[in-house]
Image: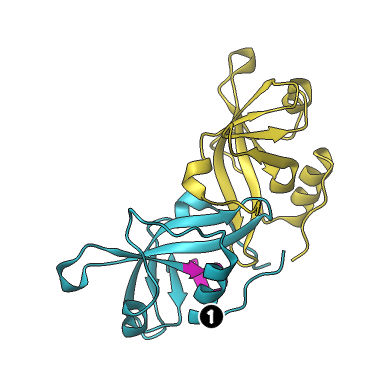
Chain colours: A yellow, B cyan
Amino acid sequence: MHTKVLSATTLINDDVKNRAGDDLGKIEEVMLDVDNGRISYAVLSFGGFLGMGDKLFAIPWSALNLDTEEKCFYLNVDQKQLENAPGFDKNHWPNMADPEWGRSVHDYYNVTPYQN
Amino acid sequence: MHTKVLSATTLINDDVKNRAGDDLGKIEEVMLDVDNGRISYAVLSFGGFLGMGDKLFAIPWSALNLDTEEKCFYLNVDQKQLENAPGFDKNHWPNMADPEWGRSVHDYYNVTPYQN
């Protein structure tokens, strides 16, 4: 059996990499669609280009793959794509329940939103 | 629009009550089915009968209803039912990926397990 049931807090601070092994930051938060019982997004922090602080990115959960042995998540983008991704800073979180915003984020990472 | 997308860490420590207003404890953890993108259980701590420490209970997510204004969850059991519910102590967590264990817990709270 391969199902993994893990506590939300143990996932926070896990590293995120791509398959080439590049560091893409770490998990800052896990966002839950409470009514539908779904994990919607992980919030990834990736930091400090151009002397600015960490930037945050909402990554659709389905775009991430957990490697429990390595305790890291894989996300199939390169650093350049992430630098250009729709992000936000820690004082200006988007409304993640907005379906239009959700579609654009899913499109960027080339995954399909879940069906309720 | 009523969908609520909230961070996992903000849900921890929320109070749990029943509709009669009885205190049933608080949310200790949120358990995630990582591969299927589902919120599986909330771990509820309810404390201290008979001089023992808090006991923990895995509550199927679908048995809980969040009231965002009150910042509390409603669970439709009385305290007596919870005292007799299948629980565990903080050093002996069950394997929450075990389907047989999962069925018995869902049965106790009279809810249906989600379909992957």
Residue A106 x, y percent position in the rendering: 79, 46
Q: Which chain carries label 1?
A: B
Bin the neighbour count of mark 1 within 10 Å (Cα to Cα): few under 14, some 14-19, many 20 and up: few
Residue kind at label 1, given as amino acid type: Asp
Q: In which quarter of the image is the N terminus of chain A?
A: bottom right
Part of the protein shown in magenta? B59-69
Q: Does the magenta stretch include residue A99?
A: no
Q: Can residue A95 be seen in this view?
A: no
**Quarter residue B82 falls in:** bottom left
**Quarter residue B19 falls in:** bottom left
Q: Looking at the image, is A11 positioned above or below residue B91?
A: above
Looking at the image, residue A11 sits to the left or right of residue A59; the answer is: left
**Quarter residue A78 falls in:** top right
Q: Can residue A102 be seen in this view?
A: yes
Residue B67 x, y percent position in the rendering: 49, 70
Q: Write down the residue under mark 1.
A: B107
Q: Looking at the image, is A28 positioned above or below residue B65?
A: above
| Viewer-side residue, A106 vs A65 | A65
Looking at the image, residue B62 sits to the left or right of residue B81; the answer is: right
Q: Is residue B66 magenta?
A: yes
| Viewer-side residue, B115 vs A38 | B115
Q: Residue at x 71, y 69 (%)?
A: B115
SS at mark 1 in the image: helix
Q: Which residue is drawn at 82% across and 38% down?
A: A108
Q: Quadrant of the C terminus of chain A?
A: bottom right
